[in-house]
Amino acid sequence: MIWALRGLVGMVYVYAGIAKLNPDWLRGEPLRIWFPQDADLPLAGHLLTREWVAVTASWVTVGFELLVVPALMWRRTRPIAYAAVVCFHLGTWIVLPQIGAFPFIMIGGALVFFPSDWPRRLLARLGVSRRMRHGRAVVPHRGVAWAVGVIAVVELLLPLRPALYPGDVRWTEEGYRFSWRVMLTEKVGHARFVVEDPDTGRRWTVDPGTFLNAPQERAMSVQPDMVLDAAHILRDRYRARGVAEPRVYADVMVAMNGAPPRRLIDPSTDLASVGWSLAPRDWILRRDASPRAVAARRTPPHLPLAG
């Protein structure tokens, strides 16, 4: 059971390290964008404005994530590796507080690589061992063992599913969730919608800020599946207002890792008629698509284009 937990923690590091072996990360993006925002930090803040610091931090992060699991598994290097875990995650939390509780989860989770009796030995050193009861070893039921095995297979395969989709997963986000692509992108987007009543020809331009709060709007404007959800919210709202079959179009411009903004969603697709599916979504415009291919997507003349 302890090895199952070690596997769950280890997969996060290994998959995160492999995902960072891409040109953007190795040349310092998006750390080059994030670090200068903390230039006012005491002592080391001025270093965060230097380009070489972002590039060095990117390479050090890759090395740490790929090597820390073997180092935690070997008894001789385990204390040093755990010290590196604490320093690395506290450092990322200080510089990138937007990642929330993740650093502390990993600091706590990495303790499973120590021998299972470490809490008892630690308390014994503190003089409280008399209060502890020694439990007996329990052999898991065969059904539990099978359940753990199934979970392990799922956890191993989920991060691989982006390979089933065309294009750059960081852009399309098809298969992105649970693939442990941690801190890979800085995406900024702008979205607006047009709702059309096909029966009367009436059209309404809708700012997403009118029905989403600020964090929801920021998240939605760079994630295609959330754009689809927002379009469905508008569809349902306009149906409630008496529009029988409203059509909803979206124009979304996204800049990723400091690159010039590009269109994310096919503006000619009626998102109100698009359902949820695990199949590749042809209404997501690929980041590597040629300008000619993007231009071939005819935009309805009534749709105002962003940018």
Image: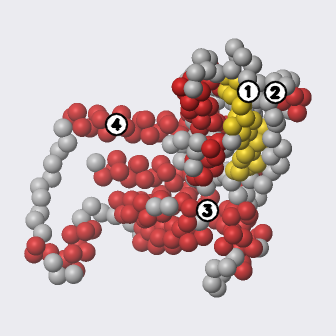
Under tag 3, what secondary structure? helix
Label 2 with label 1: CB-CB less than 8 Å = yes
The quarter of the displayed image where residue 161 is located: top right
Residue at image location 78% in from the left, 69% down from the top = 51
Along the line of sight, which residue is nearer the eye, 26 or 278? 278
Q: Is residue 238 left or right of residue 103?
A: right
Residue 273, percent from left and from top = 62, 20
The reply to whether the C-beta atoms of the residues labelled 3 and 2 are less than 8 Å apart is no
**Of marks 3 and 1, which one's residue comes earlier in the chain?**
3
Q: Which residue is mark 2?
A: 302
Q: Position of residue 229 (x, y in %)?
A: 57, 33
| Amino acid at the residue labelled 2 | His
Q: CA distance from mark 4 to mark 3?
A: 30 Å
Task: Specify the amino acid type for callout 1.
Answer: Arg
Q: Which residue is mark 3?
A: 61
Q: CA distance from mark 2 to mark 1?
A: 8 Å
Q: Which of pointers 3 and 2 lies earlier in the amino acid sequence? A: 3
Q: Residues within 10 Å of mark 1 (few under 14, many from 20)?
A: some
Q: What's the CA distance linking mark 4 and mark 1?
A: 53 Å
Q: Secondary structure at mark 2?
A: loop
Going from N to C along the chain, the mark reached first, 4 or 3, is 3
Mark closest to the chain's N terminus, 2 or 4: 4
Mark 1 residue element: strand
Q: State which mark lies toward you, 3 or 2.
A: 2
